[in-house]
């Protein structure tokens, strides 16, 4: 029916009469932009004044029951003729998360339509335009693109800067403040092109600057610290969280910025080595009937019990004959992280997302990919994406 960019929503809605609003709306891309678009659409559909309020049902997250969504879309409410069914951050386009049969039924329902005055509003991070479900949505309703370029090409940087400056200017103008180009560049240099972080920083600057109408350097220095994140870390973090769409988005950005595929492979291998080491220690202690770690441990319990036991275990290993000389694998030991244990705690949490069998399988894939990338004319991007799919789908073997 219609595909538009997020900044075209005002013009699109203004051209519609109240009874012309599409019954299906898909909003995808950046979370901050999606929230703004979804709130705008909900306000439009909910109406104002004495108009009867619609019934709104919201479904959220990976554990969504698509059958209940379809039932809600197809049934009437006793409270209002108008019904809004809202889906947030659901894995509609992530392989293996929802059954093929349910997705086909859902796609068929979207295509055939719902009862009058029933609306389906979806807000998700990523899409796959090749899927039949997207084609059904595209044919039946409105698709709003809220993506922000992730690459480092001049055109991408220019568009990102335009998007961020526009949002920041609106944010500041509501508080009757403004900021010069130099100060804006300083904020971006310190925190990077992360919209949530930039907006959070602007809100702090608005408060800190008090009655001053112009935000200047002396306001920025005490408030905005350098927090820009290593992009390789961002990728590995998404992969270890098993979030496919964010993993692919991060990898595309790395390749666009000129990172070599072998750099990306090395980062993935390094992180999975750490998770494998942690998982192996947990399994060894469980086999000895001495539980080391249980899902649900908080940070204090981790420090007092888990980390203390691991450090003792590593000390025993080093005292053995075959560990008197420095082992190749000793860089994985957690003793070096004893002074800053929180990142290790995070890795223990991430280890819960994988079984030992899955990790062994993924290591085999990493080894195969290393050989292919170094010794053949294989497509590096395709190989990396195939690995991301395997790593992010549960029970990949």
Image (cartoon, rainbow, N blue to C red):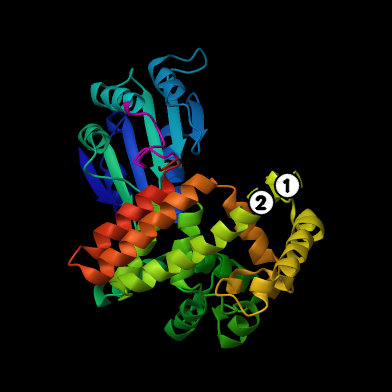
Q: Dot 1: within a 10 Å radius of its alpha carbon, few (fewer than 14), some, or many (20 or more) residues?
A: few
Instruction: Look at mark 2 in the image and give the residue it sits on.
Output: 284
Position above or below: 207 against 189: above
Q: Main secondary structure of the magenta part?
A: loop
Q: Which residue is mark 1?
A: 288
- The disc placed on residue 207 is none
Residue 321 part of the magenta segment = no
Q: Up-down: is 76 above or below 181?
A: above
The one of 255 and 105 positioned closer to us in this rendering: 255
* Residue 305 visible in this rendered orientation of the protein: yes
99 versus 43 height, above or below:
above
Mark-to-mark CA distance, 1 and 2: 6 Å
Instruction: Indicate the secondary structure of the residue bearing disc 2.
Output: helix
| Residue at x 59%, y 81% (from the top left corner) | 220
Quadrant placement of the N terminus: top left
- Tell which of 53 and 231 is nearer to you: 231
**Could you tell me residue 257's position as x and y percent?**
32, 74
- The total number of labels drawn is 2
Question: In this rendering, would 111 be left or right of 43?
Answer: left
Depth check, front residue: 260 or 177: 260
Q: Residue at x 28, y 43 (%)?
A: 143
Residue 106 rendering spot, x and y as whole percentages: 33, 25
Q: Quadrant of residue 136?
A: top left
10 Å neighbourhood of mark 2: few (<14), some, or many (≥20)?
few
Q: Is residue 29 visible?
A: no
Q: Are marks 1 and 2 in contact (CB under 8 Å)?
A: yes
In the picture provided, is 272 more to the left or to the right than 304?
left
Residue sitting at x 38%, y 69%: 264
Q: Which quadrant, please, contains the C terminus?
A: top left
Query: Residue 348 location, x and y as percent?
Result: 63, 56
Q: Which residues are magenta?
A: 90-100
Q: Is residue 94 magenta?
A: yes
């Amino acid at each position: 029916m219609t595909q538009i960019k997020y900044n075209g929503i005002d013009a699109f809605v203004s051209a519609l009469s109240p009874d012309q609003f599409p019954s299906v709306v898909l909003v995808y891309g950046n979370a901050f932009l999606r929230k703004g678009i979804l709130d705008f659409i909900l306000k439009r559909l909910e109406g104002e004044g004495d108009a009867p309020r619609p019934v709104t049902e919201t479904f959220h997250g990976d554990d969504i029951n698509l059958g209940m969504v379809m039932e809600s879309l197809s049934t009437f409410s006793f409270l209002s003729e108008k019904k809004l069914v809202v889906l947030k951050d659901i894995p509609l386009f992530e392989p293996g998360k929802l059954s093929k049969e349910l997705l086909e039924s859902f796609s068929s329902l979207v295509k055939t339509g719902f009862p009058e005055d029933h609306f389906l509003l979806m807000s998700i991070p990523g899409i796959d335009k090749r899927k039949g479900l997207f084609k059904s949505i595209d044919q039946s309703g409105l698709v709003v693109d809220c993506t922000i370029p992730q690459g480092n090409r001049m055109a991408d940087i220019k568009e990102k800067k335009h998007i961020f400056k526009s949002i920041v200017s609106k944010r500041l103008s509501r508080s009757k403040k403004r900021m010069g180009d130099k100060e804006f560049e300083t904020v971006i240099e310190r925190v990077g092109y992360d919209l949530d972080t930039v907006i959070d920083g602007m809100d702090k600057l608005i408060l800190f600057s008090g009655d001053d109408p112009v935000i200047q350097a002396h306001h920025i220095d005490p408030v905005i610290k350098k927090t820009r994140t290593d992009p390789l870390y961002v990728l590995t973090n998404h992969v270890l969280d098993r979030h496919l769409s964010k993993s692919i988005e991060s990898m595309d950005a790395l390749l666009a910025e000129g990172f070599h595929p072998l750099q990306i492979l090395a980062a993935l291998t390094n992180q999975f080595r750490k998770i494998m080491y942690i998982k192996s220690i947990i399994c060894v202690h469980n086999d000895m009937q001495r539980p080391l770690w249980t899902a649900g441990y908080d940070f204090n319990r981790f420090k007092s019990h888990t980390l203390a036991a691991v450090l003792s275990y590593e000390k025993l290993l080093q005292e053995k004959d075959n560990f008197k000389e420095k082992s190749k694998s000793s860089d994985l030991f957690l003793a070096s992280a004893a002074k800053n244990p929180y990142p290790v705690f995070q890795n223990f949490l991430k280890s819960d997302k994988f079984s030992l069998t899955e990790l062994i399988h993924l290591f085999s894939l990493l080894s195969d990919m290393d050989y292919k990338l170094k010794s053949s004319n294989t497509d590096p991007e395709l190989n990396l994406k195939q690995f991301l799919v395997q790593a992010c789908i549960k029970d990949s073997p």
